[in-house]
Amino acid sequence: MRDTSGGKPLHKAPDFSFVQGGLFIQLLRWTHLSDDIRTNVRRPVIVIALLAWLPLLVFSALEGQMLGGTVAVPFVYDVDVHIRLLLALPLLIIAEVATLNRLPLLLQQFTVRHLVPEKSMARFEAVVASAMRLRISVFAEVLLIAVVYGVGILVVWRHYWTLDTATWYATPSAEGSKLTLAGMWYGYVSMPIAQFLLLRWYWRMFVWARLLWQVSRIELSLVPAHPDRVGGLGFLASAWSAFAMLAAAHGALAAGQITSRILFAGATLLQFKYEIAVVVVFMLCIVIGPLLFFAPQLAAAKLVGMRKYGALAARYVREFDAKWLNDGATANEALVGSADIQSLADLGNSYEMMRTMSFTPISMRATLGLAAATLAPIAPLLLTMIPLNELLGILMKLVF
């Protein structure tokens, strides 16, 4: 395919597969859970979720700690664990498909829209290739596993998360908390799986942010008068939808912890308003924050565009005034239907688009959409503040 504007070949961005490759994907293939996660995500979701959760149910039942017994928190009533392993964990895996389908298309827009000039194309392709190597790094994922077990399990979970009271996964003793059989599976299998997938996503977000940073350092061919009012970079705002499932997974993790506190510690939802705000802000920072990297180029493009379009507008308006206001038009030239009027209006529209051009490709829709995705798993907890019958009554009044 050729560029009809310049007659030169239209470059196509490398196929940047954001989630394909790496140790986890290879493991899915080795175990025949999924040859291609884009077409078969259901099986790995079910198998991994059951691998993390089902043994806990069986072991806690065998030890008499599933429904009651001598423990303060039986397994069935540990809502945090159920939400973490049966909701958040599957969402982290399902999010693979969303990013796999969306991000390559977004990245290709840099070339489809001719935002990367010919002289910078080699550098752009090198940036993408570097990101591709990082995202499939087996060393990085092995390091994440080491962090999960060395810090997340042996230090943080064993010394700071385990409760001082008897639970289905641990009982206090003179030497410290002693793990039950279910607790050993939870601490050395279930938790590491969830933590690894979460840290793996943080690694990917770093790779994505690094990619955007490096692309923003390339001198792009921005169009100040572009209708999207961000120089042609408006497509980047839609990246939030690729990470909506990841945001929902974070909301589910927060919802699990809050629900446990409400049920067993007598807390209220309003007590966690700051924690909820932190989760939302965190997701906005890691997903939408990297778009700020393009602010310097957009500001410079707007400044140059305003200066050039201002000079063009001044020249056109002078010629328009000289022709139509100072008797410069010929006697047989009609004012009604003149193309000069339409050209003046078009120039004004272009100048107005440039004047209202934003310095960042961040949209309100993207911000609200990502926040809503994060808050969706937490929203049902509103029922702890308002009885269901009252809530239904309010909804009925709003509708009817």
Image: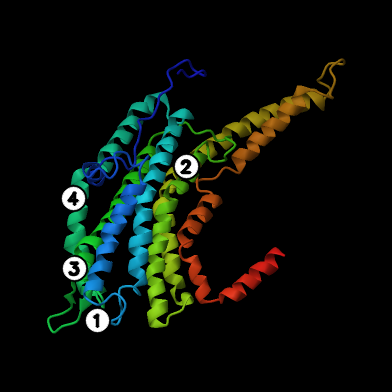
Q: Which residue is mark 4?
A: 142
Gap in angstroms between the C-alphas marked 3 and 1: 15 Å
Q: Looking at this view, name the residue that lies furthest to the right.
A: 331
First in sequence: mark 1 vs mark 2: 1
Q: Give percent across and percent down for residue 329.
A: 82, 19
- Amino acid type of the residue that numbered disc 1 sits on in the rendered structure: Ala
Q: Which residue is mark 2?
A: 236
* Cα separation between marks 4 and 2: 31 Å
Which three-letter amino acid code belongs to the residue tagged 4?
A: Val
For label 3, the residue is 184
Q: Quadrant of residue 374?
A: bottom left
Q: Position of residue 151 (x, y in %)?
A: 19, 63
Report the residue marked by disc 1: 166
**Secondary structure of residue under mark 3:** helix
Quadrant of the frame with the C terminus: bottom right
Q: Is residue 217 above or below residue 163?
A: above
- Extreme residue in the left direction: 175
Q: Relative to 155, is 50 above or below?
A: above
